[in-house]
Each structure stands twice: as C-alpha cells, then as structure tokens.
Image (tube, rainbow, N blue to C red):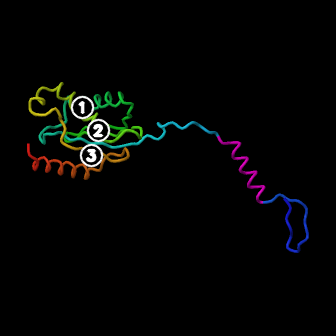
Amino acid sequence: MDFFEENGSQSKSTFSTFQSEEKAAMDLNDNVLLEPIYPEAYDLSYTCLLIPGHPLQQLNGDLAKLLPQWLQQICASYNWQIEFVTVNPDYFQWGLRVIPSTQTGQFMQKIRHGTSELILSSFDQIRNKISTNDFWAAGYLVVLGTRPHPKEMIEQYIRLSRRQQESSPV
C-alpha cells in the first residue's frame, strides 16, 4: 500500500499499519486450535446443606460414617461430582458439580429422598421416632460455588428452620 508524505510527494511502497495488523491476525489464526464444546466443561457448582428433621437427632456414629458413602452412590448414579462432604452432628453439607440443565430442586430432591430412604431402612431406632418418610427438616440451604457455608450462615439457617418447625402445625 502506498502513502503520501505531508508535502504531497509520493514515496515508494512501504509496509502499512493495516498490513502489519492483518499479518499479525493471520499469524494468530495459524496457531489457533478449535476444539468441540462439551456441556461438561460448563458444570455448575453448589454447596448444599440439610439438617435432621428432629432437633434432637444428631448425625453421629454409624449414621455419620454412612452418609458420605450413600451420597456418593446417589451422585454417581446421576453423574454428579462431589467436591467435599462434611457431616456435623447438626447438619450434613457437601459440594456438588452438576451439568447446567440440572435444576437445584431436582438434585436436592433426589439426594434428600435417597438419603432419607437409606437412613430409615438402616436405622430402626430413627424410623420408629419419626412419623414421615423424610428424615430431613423442611427446606435446604444451597449456595452457588463449592466453598463451605460460613459458620454464621449455617447457624442462622438452623435457627430459622427450627423456628419455622415450632410455628407450623404438625
């Protein structure tokens, strides 16, 4: 491409800015590797929490040992990935990765129902103390990302859930 100097006289052809940008773009394109897009590359991560339905029920002993194994079995059957598991006497918390098309209510219902069924079929003493098929308190706490919930958030969630239990008719 030719250009003119300020005095209007034509100089010989030279390499313009436009050409150098075009050449750089071509060099970049030579090194670009296009890969197919898989939905798995865009998994969503959540941190989830359930508390026992009865305020005096504690997650300890054999129950505390079995919950992570049962969670792993349930999640493996749906191709969900567990990032971490915490069993505290007052709550059950885990990090989970799922594909974006999986709704929060869907995976929580599956885990809640599956673990409740396993708990009640494995522990007669617990089954005999509750009148429902759900071991867990109503509701759940789910936050985007796989960082454990802050202690204050868990304590507030437990307080609110227990207060709601007290005020709701049996």
Q: Earlier in the sequence, mark 3 or mark 1?
A: 1
Q: Is residue 37 magenta?
A: no
In the image, residue 115 lies at what x, y percent?
A: 24, 31
Real-space CA distance between mark 1 and mark 2, rounded to the nearest whole angstrom: 10 Å
Q: Is 21 placed above or below 70 here? A: below
Q: Secondary structure at mark 1?
A: helix
Main secondary structure of the magenta stretch? helix
Q: Is 47 placed above or below 111 here? A: below
Q: Is residue 20 magenta?
A: yes
- Residue picked out by circle 2: 108
Under mark 2, the amino acid is Met
Total numbered labels: 3
- Residue picked out by circle 3: 141
Crowding at mark 3 (Cα within 10 Å: few <14, some 14-19, many 20+): some
17 on left or right of 136:
right
Q: Earlier in the sequence, mark 2 or mark 3?
A: 2
Real-space CA distance between mark 2 and mark 3, rounded to the nearest whole angstrom: 10 Å
Which of the 4 image quarters holds residue 96?
top left
Instruction: Tell me what residue is drawn at x 25 percent, y 37 percent.
Output: 87
Report the residue that reaches farthest toward the bottom.
7
Instruction: Tell me what residue is drawn at x 62 percent, y 39 percent.
Output: 34
Under mark 1, the amino acid is Thr
The circle on residue 115 is 1
Which quadrant does the N terminus fall into? bottom right
